[in-house]
Amino acid sequence: MAIERTISIIKPDAVAKNVIGQIYSRFENAGLQIIAARMVHLSQAQAEGFYAVHKERPFFKDLVSFMTSGPVMVQVLEGENAVAKNRELMGATNPKNADPGTIRADFADSIDENAVHGSDSLDNAAIEIAYFFGKDGDLCPRTR
Ligand code: IDP
């Protein structure tokens, strides 16, 4: 299995619930390392840019409004199979369909406010890492 990097975002609802540490523990317990992290209160332009792929969807306006409603915690996770592993830890988009024990099952209230984002492919992970952390910059892979 390959070592991969992926983007995780703890969304404003989960930041407001004060569960950043509990979510970080799940990453660490699954063998994923946090190699960069940044808390940011997204501007409308930043949120629209990040979710540009969804701009024709009926929920786009609400999504941007939610994602700018409070600070988010953005991190790069590194580890074996990181993209799929993070998606597995997150659970289904709609928390009603999320497997028990997943982040969304435990911390999300609705499909609109669903606690976390995770890149859905290696290609999108690279784009999203560059969006928040620059092409090569600001990543701190382990040296020990
Ligand atoms: P994902 O976050 O599980 O990858 P996507 O389909 O990429 O799901 O959707 C991005 C985000 O848009 C979701 O996490 C959720 O916050 C929001 N979203 C997706 N589908 C709906 C919907 O049907 N109603 C409201 N919000 C939605």
Image (spheres, grey):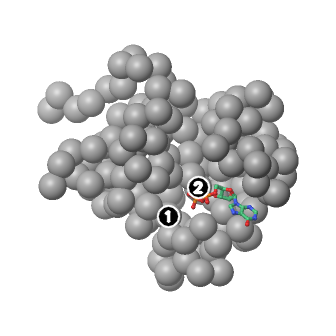
Residue tagged 1: 90
| Kind of element beneath mark 2 | strand
Q: Is residue 68 above or below residue 66?
A: above
Q: Are marks 1 and 2 in contact (CB under 8 Å)?
A: yes
Nearest the viewer among 113 and 58 is 58
Residue tagged 2: 116
Image quarter in which the N terminus is found: bottom left
Q: Is residue 135 above or below residue 18?
A: above
Badge 2 density bin: few <14, some 14–19, many ≥20, Cα 10 Å: many
Badge 1 density bin: few <14, some 14–19, many ≥20, Cα 10 Å: many
The reply, left or right, for residue 50 in relation to residue 82 is right
Query: Which quadrant holds residue 124?
Result: top left
Mark 2 C-beta closer than 8 Å to ligand 1? yes
In the rendering, at what x and y percent does residue 34 appear? 37, 41
**Residue at 50% in and 52% down:** 118
Query: Which quadrant holds residue 17?
Result: bottom right
**Residue at 54% in and 28% down:** 132
Mark 1 C-beta closer than 8 Å to ligand 1? yes
**Residue at 39% in and 41% down:** 123
- Disc number at residue 31? none
Query: Which quadrant holds residue 51?
Result: top right
In the rendering, at what x and y percent does residue 79 appear? 26, 48
